Amino acid sequence: MQLRPGASKAGRSLADLELQVNAELSAFSDDLERLLASLKVPLAFSLGAMGSRKHNFYNEVFQRAGYAELALQVQDLWLQGQRKESHRTDP
């Protein structure tokens, strides 16, 4: 857990922290393919443009979740200026 070392460094314990999860529900539909397609562009932006090649929080989260190859592929395409191709990749 990465929170423990950070809290310790700040002289705090995990008990001192209030942890919250933020979630957003943006659409309902029976058409799963359409919903997934609408999420690919913003996801490619997050994986490719939010931070640098070396430090991108969203890319690192997807890598830790088991999608390292895909996350790095999307980031590479984005950083090479191939924006449309970056959100056309599939797992």
Image (tube, rainbow, N blue to C red):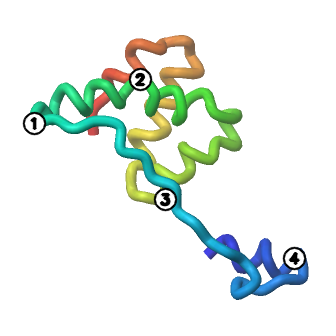
At 48% from the left and 22% from the top, the residue drawn is 77
Residue 11 coordinates in the image, percent (x, y): 90, 82
Q: Secondary structure at mark 1?
A: loop
Residue ranking furthest to the left: 30
Please tell me which of labels 2 and 4 falls first in the chain: 4
- Residue at the spot of label 2: 41
Front tag of 1 and 4: 1
Which residue type does callout 4 highlight? Lys
What secondary structure is found at the residue carrying circle 4?
helix
Name the spot of residue 69 as percent of width and height, x first.
41, 43
Q: CA distance from mark 3 to mark 1?
A: 30 Å
**Mark 1, residue position:** 30
Q: Which residue is mark 4?
A: 9
Neighbour class for label 3 at 10 Å: few (<14), some, many (≥20)? few
- Give the spatial CA distance, label 1 vs label 4: 47 Å
Labels 3 and 1: the sequence-earlier one = 1
Give the amino acid type for the residue marked by disc 2 in the picture.
Val
* Residue 20 placement: quadrant: bottom right
Identified by mark 3, the residue type is: Arg
- Tag shown at residue 64: 3
**Which corner quadrant of the image does residue 37 belong to?**
top left
**For the residue labelled by badge 2, is the local secondary structure a helix, a strand or a loop?**
helix
Q: Is residue 67 above or below residue 21?
A: above
Are circles 1 and 2 on residues that touch, CB within 8 Å?
A: no
Q: Is residue 5 left or right of residue 9?
A: left
**Where is the C terminus found, in terms of image quarters?**
top left
Q: Secondary structure at mark 3?
A: helix
- Between disc 4 and disc 3, whose residue precedes? 4
Give the crowd class for mark 1: few <14, some 14-19, many >=20 residues within 10 Å.
few
Mark 1 and mark 4 lie on one chain; the one further toward the N terminus is 4
